[in-house]
Amino acid sequence: MRRWTQPTPGGPGREVLQESPAHQPEHTAAGEPDPGGSRNAGTGATTRRQFLGYAIAAPFLVVAADAVGSGSAVAGSSQALEAAVALPAPAGFPSLPQPADILDLGDLLILAGLPTANLLYLQVASDGTVNFVLPRAENGQGLVTAMAMVIADEMEVALSDVVVTLAPAEPKLLFNQLTGSSNSVRSLWDPVRTAAAAARGRLLSAAADLLDEPIGSLTVLDGVVSAPSGKSITYGQLTSMAAVSQSIAVQATPKDPSQYRIIGTPQPQLANLDIVTGRQRYAMDIDVPGALPAMVRRAPTIKGTLVSFDNPDAVRAMPGIVDVAVFAFGVAVVGKTFGQVIDAIDMVEATWAPGPVAGENDGTVRAQLVAAPTVPFLVPPLLGTAVQATFDWAPVNHAPMETNVAVADVRTDRATVWAPLQTPIAALQAIAGALGMSEDRVTVNVLRGGGSFGRTLFFDAALESAMISKAVGRPVKLMWHRTNDMRHGRGHPQAHHRLQAVHLAGEVLSFEHRVTSVITNVSAGLGEALTAEADKLPPGKLTFGQTLFETTITCPYNFGVVSQLLTEVPLAFNTDSWRSVFSYNTRGAEEIFIDKVAASMGRDPVEFRLAHLSDDRQRAVLEKVADVGNWGRVMPAGTAQGVGFHQEFRSYTACLVEMDVTARAEPRVTKAVVAIDVGLPINPSSLEGQMLGGLTDAISLVLTMGNHIEEGLPIESGWAHFRYARQGDTPPEVTVIVMPPVGDRPGGAGELGVPAAVGAIGNAYARATGSIPTSFPISFTIDWTPPPPGPVPKSPLQPLPALGELYNY
Amino acid sequence: MPTYRFTLNGSPVTIDSPSDLRVLWVLRDLLGVNGPKYGCGLDECRACTCHVDGRAFATCSTPVSEIDGHDITTIEGLAATVPGAGPGTLHPVQQAWLEHDVPQCGFCQPGQIMMTAALLAQVPEPTDDQIDQIRNVCRCGTYFRIREAIKRAAELMARDRSDG
C-alpha cells in the first residue's frame, strides 16, 4: 500500500490511502518518457489516441475542443457495451444485462449532448496563466480543482498557474452545461485534456520555431520550454506567437497516463485559502450596487397560492422596509437588512389558496404508495424458500447550508442574475420567459454554491429574484429563510419498497424489487436530455423518472431472475434529484435485504456477496474493506459490523462500518472503512472527501434525518428537528482507500458513496440490535412542537455567552 | 436610532442600528463583513459563529445592543489575532484546515473555524468527547476531517507555545 502525503510543508503526515497498482497501467509507453508530449502517434505509442482541437483566432493562444469530446465519448460507450456483454460467466445463475449495465445515465447524457456539441475554451495569457471557463457548477464537489489538475498536467504548467472560472449560462451549449448525475468529470475528461494537449502542441511548435530546435528535443516544466542547448522560453512569451489569425483545426495528443505527474495525486481544493479566510464569495456576499435584501412570505401549504395580501401598508411602514410585491408564490418584502425583512414577512396578513397536496400527511401518502399498482413478482415464492421485506423512506429535504438564493438586477431592457445553478441554461430561458425578454437580453452568472446535493438542478430562487427585481424596480438579493427552504424547498420523495428473493438448494433463483415512490421531478434540464436518448434503450418508452431509474439502478449480483421496477405516484410535492436520486433508497434497501437473504441461506454477508458478484473490480473493493476493517472480528454485545456494496457511474465502492447501540441514547457509527474504484482517479483527496460526505449523508438518512408531512407541509423548520448528523454522530475513525487506477478514464464519484454506506449502516444496526430496520430514519419521533405554518420562527434574543461557556453559546 | 460602538477585527466601529437587530445582519448588511454566514437564523447550525472577547457566539441570535463596547472578531480578522501576525499569516486553525483539505462547499467553515479557535483557546488539547460536543452543522459531512484538523491545530498551537 502506498501512502500519499499531502503536499503541504510541515504537514502532519495526513494521508490519503491509495493502493499501489497491482500491475503497470496498460498504456505505459514502451519508449522514452515524453515530457513534452510531442511524440507523434505514428512513432510507436500506438495506444495513444489522437484528438482534434481548434486554435481560435485571437491575439493570445486560445484553443478549443468539442465540449462533449464526441469521438471518444461514443467510443467509450461502445467499449462499455462490449465489456458488459463480454463479462465472464460468473458463479450462480447469471442475470441478464440490465439497461444500466449497458448504457448508464452518464453515457446517456454524453450522447444527448452530441448533436448540439459546442466548444469549450482555454486561453494562455501573456503572464503564462492558463484560463479555463468551466461550463459546470461547483458546489464543493471539487470539480474546479480536478479540471485544473487535468489542464496543468497536460500542459506541463504549475497547478497554481491554472485559473478556472464558472461559465455563465450559454444557451448554445444546450445539454452541455448541466451539472448532475456525477457526470462532470466523466463528460469533461476528453474535451478538457484535448484542449490542453492542443494548446501544449501549439506552444511547443512555436517554441521550436523560435528557438530553432527540433520539437522532439524540447521539454517543458512549469510552463517553461527548454532545449538541450540550454535555451528556454516561457508559455507566456510564446502565447502571441502560438496564436492564430484565422481559426484552424489542430491535432491534439493527450499524454500517456504513465506520464501523469499531477493527475492521481492528492491535491487540496484550490478555493481552500479563500474559504478559510472568509474571502470566498457566495451569492449573498457579492457586491451588486444597490441590491437590497429580499425574502418571501410563503403559503401554509406546499405550492399554496396567494389570494390576497391584506395589510400592505402596515408591512411597508415597518422599520427598514423599502418595498413589497405580490406573486402567486407569496409576498416579497424588500428592506435594508435581512433582520428587518424577516420581521416584516412575519407581519404579513394574507389569504391563501391551498396547494395540491394540502390534505396529505405521512400516513395518507404511504397508503397511496402501498396501494399503487405494481408489476407482480415474476417468480412465485413457492418455487423455493422465499425471503421478503418491505422498507419505507421518509421524504428528505436537500438542506444545503446555503438556502435557495439569487441576486437579480432587472432593468427595462436587460436582466442579470447571479446564483448557484446546475442548469443555468434552463434558468436563463425560464427567466427570459417570465420577464418577457428575449434570451439575448438575459445574463445568468453561475456562482459557487454552498452545497447543493441536487437542489440547484432547479432554479426556483433565480426565477423568483428576477420577478421580484422587475416588480420593485431595483436589484435584489433574494434569500429563502431556512424554515421556508425546508418546508417549501425541494427534496427526495417518500418511498415504499417491497422485495422478494427466492432461493433453492443453495442458489438464489430470483431477486425482485418493487419501488413505489412519490414522483421525482427531474424535468429541469435533465428531463429534456433524457428524452432524446431514452427510446434507444431496451425497455422502450418510459417516463423521465422511470428512464432515470432504469439507467441508474442495476443489481450487481448474479441472483438469477432480477427485476427492479419503479412506480411513481403523481403527488405534487416539491421534489428533485437528491444525491444518488433513486439509489440510496433502492440500492440501500437492497443491500440491507441481501443480508437477510444471506442469513436465510446460512451464509456470511461478505462471503455471500463475493460469491455472487461478477467481476474482479466489484470483489476487490469489498475484499479491501473486509480486510482493512477486519471483518468478522469478535465484538462486544450491542456493537456490530455491517457491509454494503454499490456500483454506479462506472465506479465501484464498498463500505464497512462498526456501530455501537449501547453507549449513547442513540446508535452511533464508531468506525468506517470505505474503498472506492473510479477507474482512473484524478484527485484522491477529493475522492476521499466525497466518500466522507456520502458516509455522513448515509448516517443521517438511516438513523435520524427526514421530514414529517402534516397537512401538506413538512413540519421541520430547521436543523434542530431535521437532524443531519453533527460531529458527535459521526465516526472518530474513518479510512478511505482509493483503489489503483484501472483503465484510462475516470468514473463518477459525487453520489457514489451514499448507497453502500446506507446498506452498511442498516446492516450493522440489524446485527447490533438483532432487528432489521424497515422504516427510515430509524429515530424519527416528534418530541417537539412544530412551529405553525406560514410565519418563520425566530430564536429568542440572547445575552452574550457566559465566561467559560464553550458549546451552548 | 441608537448608536453602538464596538471593536471589529481590531478597528473601532460606530453604527446606528435598531437595538434588536441581530449582530449577523449588522455585520453583513450594514458593515459588509460577509465571512459569517446565514444557515438558519435560529441558533441551530452555527454557520454565523464569531467571537466576542475571544468567546464563540451565535451572531444570528445576539442583538447588537449586547456587543456595545465589546471586541468582535470575524473569520476575516482571526489571523490578525495571532501574536506578531503580518500579511499572509494564518491562524493555526486555518493552517490545519488547509493541511487537511477540510472544506468542500466551504459555507459552514468560517463558523467551524471560529468555533474551533474559541475551543482551543480554552481547551488546548480537546478529547474526542469534547470535540463531539461541537454543534456546528457541516452539510457536506466533512466532520472527520474537521476532527483531524482540530487535533492538528492543537499540535500547531502547542508548538507555537513551546517556541514562544
Image (cartoon, coloured by chain):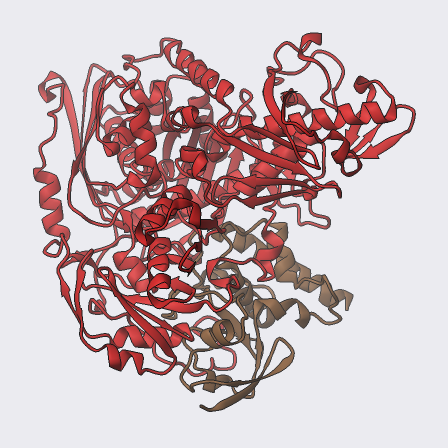
Chain colours: A red, B brown
Percent position of residue A274, x then y: 60, 56
In the orientation shown, which residue stands out farthest toward the right? A229
Looking at the image, which is closer to me, A111 or A698? Answer: A111
Q: Is residue A733 left or right of residue A540?
A: right
Percent position of residue B14, x then y: 57, 86
Percent position of residue A555, x then y: 30, 24
* Image quadrant where one finds the N terminus of chain A: top right
In the orientation shown, which residue stands out farthest toward the front? A413
- Considering only vertical position in the picture, is A474 above or below A247? below
Q: Is residue A609 left or right of residue A33?
A: left
Looking at the image, which is closer to me, A274 or B156? Answer: A274
- Considering only vertical position in the picture, is A639 above or below A79? below
Residue A173 appears in the rendering: yes
Q: Quadrant of residue A219?
A: top right
Q: Residue at x 24, y 27 (%)?
A: A597
Q: Residue at x 37, y 57 (%)?
A: A466
Q: Quadrant of residue A564?
A: top left
In the orientation shown, which residue stands out farthest toward the bottom? B2
Q: Please give the count of numbered marks on the rendered protein.
A: 0
Percent position of residue A313, x then y: 25, 80
Q: Quadrant of residue A149?
A: top right
- Considering only vertical position in the picture, is B15 above or below A756? below
Residue A1 appears in the rendering: no
Q: Residue at x 22, y 60 (%)?
A: A328
* Image quadrant where one finds the C terminus of chain A: bottom left
- Considering only vertical position in the picture, is A185 above or below A602? below
Looking at the image, which is closer to me, A417 or B51? Answer: A417
Q: Is residue A1 left or right of residue A288?
A: right
Q: Is residue A743 left or right of residue A60?
A: left
Q: Residue at x 30, y 66 (%)?
A: A296
